[in-house]
Amino acid sequence: MIPPELFLPLIIFFARVVETSLDTIRTVYITKGHTYLAAGIGVVKIGIWLVSTGLVLTNFSNIPGILAYIAGYGVGTLIGMNIEERISIGTVLVRIITPKDPEPLIAHLSGIGFGITRVNAEGSFTPSVAVLLMVVPRTELDRLLAVLGKDYPDLLFTVEDIRKMSEQGTIFYGKRRGGLRRFLGMD
């Protein structure tokens, strides 16, 4: 049985964790352009915020409640970031720069479903380099990074989020899902 003096702080803590997690996810959906989904999450988030903040302000002498409110914010941020990583919203640009012959790398990555654009360039310390550009669904990023880390550990690469892109063209040759996952921005 929960002691009565801890009941209110626990409610405040869990409400704040849920509210802050939702806010983190809502922010991600806003940056990815999913405005209606972000608005819906915002409505739920603000309702929870009103309850948790109201409980703290009406019981301002309850120090454990104030501490629970503060701790819930930190824990909620961590949980929200973890959830965002797991649902892998959106698409990224992976840029690989290599001074070596990129053809074996291109063949390997193309063979496992990744589209690649090659640009020949010059570096300040190397007379010629190849810049490989890949537009990758975030759901496939971990798999790509695992291949690069295992088979090509010396490559220089960067990963950047893409906010908007055209719907035309094939960027990944694997199977893409539709329905709810696509609506939520997870595919």
Image: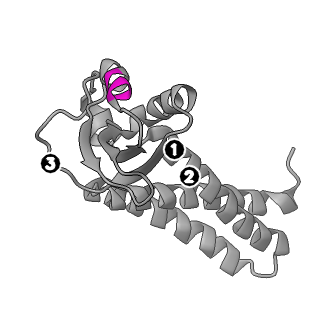
Q: Looking at this view, is 164 or 186 the one in front?
A: 164
Find numbered disc 3 in the image and state the secondary structure of the residue it sits on: loop
Give the amino acid at mark 2.
Met
**Separation (CA) of disc 3 from disc 1:** 24 Å
Residue hosting label 3: 166
Query: What crowding class fits label 2: few (fewer than 14 Cα within 10 Å), some (14-19), or many (20 or more)?
Result: some
* Residue at the front extreme of this rendering: 127
Q: Is residue 30 left or right of residue 170?
A: right
Quarter in which the C terminus is drawn: top left
Residue 77 in sight: yes
Give the amino acid at mark 1.
Glu
Find numbered disc 2 in the image and state the secondary structure of the residue it sits on: helix
Q: Residue at x 49, y 47 (%)?
A: 84
Residue hosting label 2: 81
Quarter in which the N terminus is drawn: top right
**Separation (CA) of disc 2 from disc 3:** 27 Å
In magenta segment, residue 104: yes
Q: Which residues are magenta?
A: 103-107
Q: Nearer the viewer, mark 2 or mark 3?
A: 3
Residue 125 at what x, y percent from top left? Answer: 45, 57
Q: Residue at x 23, y 35 (%)?
A: 171
Query: What crowding class fits label 3: few (fewer than 14 Cα within 10 Å), some (14-19), or many (20 or more)?
Result: few
Residue hosting label 1: 85
Q: Is residue 21 left or right of residue 178?
A: right
Find numbered disc 1 in the image and state the secondary structure of the residue it sits on: helix
In magenta segment, residue 179: no
**Separation (CA) of disc 2 from disc 1:** 6 Å
Residue 90 in sight: no
Give the amino acid at mark 3.
Ser
Of labels 2 and 3, earlier in sequence is: 2
Of labels 3 and 1, earlier in sequence is: 1
